[in-house]
Amino acid sequence: MRMLLLCSALLTCSFLQAQATLNVSPAQPRVGALTTLTLSGVTPFSITWDFGDGTAPAPGGAVATHTYVTVGSFIARATYTTVPVGGTSTTIQRALRVTEPRTIRYVPAGPEAGQVITLQALSFFQTLGIAWDFGDGTAPYISDTNTTRHTYARNGAFLVSAIDGGDGRRIQARVVVGPLGPNAPFSISYLALRWEDGTVRRTVNQGEPGLSAYADLKYEGTGLFQAQWVVDDVPLRSFSRQLTFAHRATLASGQVTQGGPQISLPTNIPGAHTVTLKVLQPGLVFQVPVIRYFVSLGPDPEGPVLQGVLPRRVRAGEEVELQLAGPKLKADMELHLGRDMEVVGPIRLVGPELALVQVFVAPTARTGARVLRASRDQGAPAGTAKLEIQPPLKKRTDRK
């Protein structure tokens, strides 16, 4: 009887292992988007995941999520055991292809009315039966490949739509035909990178979603701006945007298309990382700066904690000395003050939990309450010190 039970158990284990499957959702993962891998058909005791992109294998459960930061083909593997002691491990793998986000590109970059334009649907799930709407009142067209051609009869800005035959999703792009402003050479005169709060350095926790960098630029003329967001010298994604005669623009690394999906900068690998923007068109006569972020494993137990600040109210457009209070304050700590505020003097420790620092509040600083925090170079920002920004004083005009 014992032999029959043992054989039955072995046969059951073999059957479960034979039925194990590794599923990937979505079936065609995208760069920067969350990919879900699920091990089914077995009841695992332990699982180690290897996503095949060079990141370290890590233990987990039957469902794992991962964000791929580059385009390419990868082999994802799940190595699991089904018994706590004495069982052999089994590895199941799945090949997957990571592609760029779905976009629409067109050539030539600056078409004129009456000129043939070639439009291309990139990274669509289904390249057959793409339904095109060119946005100029002409009849929709269904193409049998991922490219189509169209001629606009007049100048203007047109919203082109293409419906992916794979999942029915509508992808849109703005096509500018002819000049929309004064005829001037297209050039970039200023480009600066920052985080949302205006700083060039920040710390985030491992796995934190929604991290986005911003590029503020000034330009002259009208033309196509093409660039790549680059993280640690590896291109994260390419994008293009038609800039019209408006002089200024802000571009976010997380924005794919207007109203489209968001892409987070990778936060899965602990340590320091660099972000820059490689401009492909137009040519630049200056070097684009680099901003940095640090992925922390969690709160820094030895890091400073900013708990209070005096004065509690400051005015935009003024320089002021702040008195900082909290445990473990250090002269070399990093202050996280928010956008349009910067430190203009060294931090001076005047007590066990007290420090002084000179800051400048820019006239453009947003009014209202904000929270100030502090950190070491490799720790998460900590603190709940509240500071209120008041509007700048109005200049008096003396009447004669």
Image (cartoon, grey):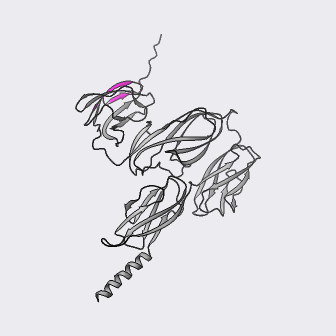
Q: Magenta span has 377? A: no
Locate the N terminus and report the quarter of the image it occupies. Answer: bottom left
State the residue in front, 368 or 112. Answer: 112
Q: Relative to residue 156, is residue 214 drawn left or right? A: left
| Direction left: furthest residue | 352
Magenta part of the chain: 313-326
Up the image or down, 351 lies above or below 179; here it is: above
Residue 316 at what x, y percent from top left?
A: 41, 27
Residue 205 at what x, y percent from top left?
A: 37, 48
The residue located at (31%, 87%) in the rendering is: 3
Q: Is residue 195 visible?
A: no
> In the rendered image, which quarter is residue 18 located in?
bottom left
> In the rendered image, which quarter is residue 79 located in?
bottom left
Residue 309 at what x, y percent from top left?
A: 29, 32
The residue located at (67%, 35%) in the rendering is: 181
Up the image or down, 245 lies above or below 63; here it is: above
The residue located at (43%, 32%) in the rendering is: 340
Main secondary-structure element of the magenta-colored stretch: strand
Residue 120 at what x, y percent from top left?
A: 66, 54
Q: Relative to residue 255, is residue 355 drawn left or right? A: left
| Direction right: furthest residue | 114
State the residue in front, 249 or 273. Answer: 273
State the residue in front, 400 or 231. Answer: 231
Q: Is residue 389 visible?
A: yes
Count of numbered marks: 0
